[in-house]
Image (cartoon, rainbow, N blue to C red):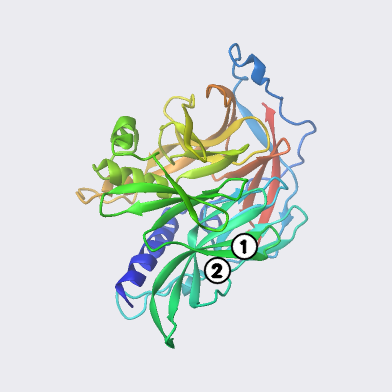
């Protein structure tokens, strides 16, 4: 396997294995909550106009669950990576490896079989739509990567593929990063081959069809942000991540000890690789996972503002939940030690490995100033994926066979 292929596949395998090790895979680490009838009445409606005098609603709220909808997707051999997204129709999107046993090594530590991963959508009517890698003229061995984004009209899936030698189609001449764009029905609408100097670690898209690509600059230990038009042509490079951006944010002091290296550029790129990105009207929210950094609102020109969320004391933000209302919905929790952590290890990341994030609640914030509107407690193992039409949506595996189930839950006061 060539050097470029190892560079692309090994991080993919590493990310998958780290998710497995931390029990962040739905089929292995999420406990199915007890089901019950959802109570009548949705959540109280916030009044943004009174944001200067608002008071958080009494804590705690809790969830009441509806009967589950079961889908013909998932088994006890499947792995569901915890990178859920949804659209405003209520469909849930997730990366799935149908058979985790195929994630195996071959003859040596530098050669691997890339996991056969795809993106799937679960519709409110009980249907399953798959966004499998599609053939591209002039390329072969198209493989989906771990990054994707769902907009109001399209699904953007980051992929890689071998470029075929035009003079001899039995040979390849390197690898390309590609964005495959689907409509919500799972039909490929276009494929965008990224420029060779773009090393994507994350992506998002505006409702205009313009695409944001977070690109790693390994030589300068930094991250670049490119704005592409809907055809993939580069429009501009946003100056969001200039030389002193991460220094101003004081990233090392605001992230878990040992999680990131001391180099600010390295810190920023690692944060952005797993950043939570959610639509916000015509703009985007970008939030650093498992930190207390401000949430950034971005448009096609760069940063609109930085919103500091009033998180409860001792908690950190895990991810933003896509929603169809005027609030910022966040999965919030704490870190707890792992009993199996290695003691005495001085290697980089050892203190990160000794702790695991534990979701505790869903918090709702006013977007005007980040003040707290409502806190909703979670039982162990519960993990909502989005907030739609006054309810939260949860995914759980059916215990008997691993089939995925969608459950709607309504917040109610205790």
Residue 350 located left or right of residue 29: left
Q: Quadrant of residue 103?
A: bottom left
Q: Is residue 60 above or below residue 128?
A: above
Tag 2–tag 1 contact (CB < 8 Å)? yes
Quadrant in which the N terminus appears: bottom left
> For the residue labelled by badge 2, is the local secondary structure a helix, a strand or a loop?
loop
Residue 77: numbered disc: 2
Which residue position holds label 1?
402
Q: Which residue is outermost to the top? A: 53
Q: Quadrant of residue 257?
A: top left
Pointer 2 or 1: first along the chain: 2
Q: Nearer the viewer, residue 85 or 237?
A: 237
* Residue 414 drawn at (x, y percent): 67, 26
Residue found at x 46% / y 26%: 308
Q: Residues within 10 Å of mark 2 (few under 14, many from 20)?
A: some
> For the residue labelled by badge 1, is the local secondary structure a helix, a strand or a loop?
loop
Q: Is residue 397 visible?
A: yes
Residue 282 located left or right of residue 244: right
Q: Nearer the viewer, residue 406 or 84?
A: 84
Residue 408 located left or right of residue 343: right
Q: CA distance from mark 2 to mark 1?
A: 8 Å
Residue 11 located left or right of residue 203: left
Residue found at x 33% / y 35%: 245
* Residue 161 drawn at (x, y percent): 46, 72
């Amino acid at each position: 396997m060539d050097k470029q292929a190892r560079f692309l596949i090994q991080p993919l395998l590493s990310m998958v294995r780290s998710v497995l090790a931390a029990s962040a895979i739905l089929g292995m680490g999420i406990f199915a909550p007890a089901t019950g009838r959802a109570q009548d009445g949705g959540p109280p409606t916030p009044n943004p106009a009174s944001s200067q005098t608002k008071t958080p609603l009494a804590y705690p709220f809790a969830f009441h669950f509806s009967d589950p909808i079961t889908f013909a997707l998932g088994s006890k051999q499947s792995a569901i990576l915890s990178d859920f997204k949804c659209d405003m129709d209520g469909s849930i999107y997730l990366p799935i490896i149908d058979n985790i046993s195929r994630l195996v090594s071959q003859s040596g530590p530098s050669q691997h079989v890339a996991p056969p991963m795809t993106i799937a959508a679960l519709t409110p009517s009980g249907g399953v739509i798959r966004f499998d890698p599609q053939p591209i003229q002039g390329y072969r061995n198209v493989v989906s990567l771990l990054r994707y984004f769902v907009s109001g009209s399209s699904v953007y899936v980051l992929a890689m593929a071998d470029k075929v030698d035009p003079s001899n189609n039995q040979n390849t001449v390197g690898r390309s990063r590609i964005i495959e764009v689907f409509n919500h029905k799972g039909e490929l609408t276009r494929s965008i081959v990224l420029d060779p100097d773009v090393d994507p670690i994350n992506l998002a898209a505006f409702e205009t069809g313009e695409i944001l690509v977070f690109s790693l600059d390994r030589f300068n230990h930094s991250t670049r942000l490119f704005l592409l038009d809907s055809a993939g042509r580069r429009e501009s490079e946003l100056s969001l991540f200039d030389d002193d951006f991460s220094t101003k944010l004081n990233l090392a002091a605001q992230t878990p000890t040992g999680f990131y290296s001391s180099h600010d550029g390295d810190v920023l790129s690692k944060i952005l690789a797993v950043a939570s990105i959610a639509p916000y009207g015509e703009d985007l929210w970008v939030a650093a996972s498992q930190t207390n950094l401000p949430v950034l609102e971005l448009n096609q020109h760069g940063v609109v503002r930085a919103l500091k969320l009033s998180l409860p004391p001792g908690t950190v933000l895990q991810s933003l939940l896509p929603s169809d209302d005027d609030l910022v919905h966040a999965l919030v929790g704490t870190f707890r030690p792992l009993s199996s952590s290695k003691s005495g290890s001085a290697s980089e990341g050892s203190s990160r490995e000794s702790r695991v994030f534990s979701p505790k609640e869903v918090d709702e914030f006013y977007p005007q100033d980040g003040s707290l509107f409502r806190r909703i407690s979670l039982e162990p193992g519960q993990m909502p994926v989005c907030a739609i039409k006054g309810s939260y949506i949860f995914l759980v595996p059916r215990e008997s066979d691993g089939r995925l189930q969608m459950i709607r839950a309504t917040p109610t006061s205790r």
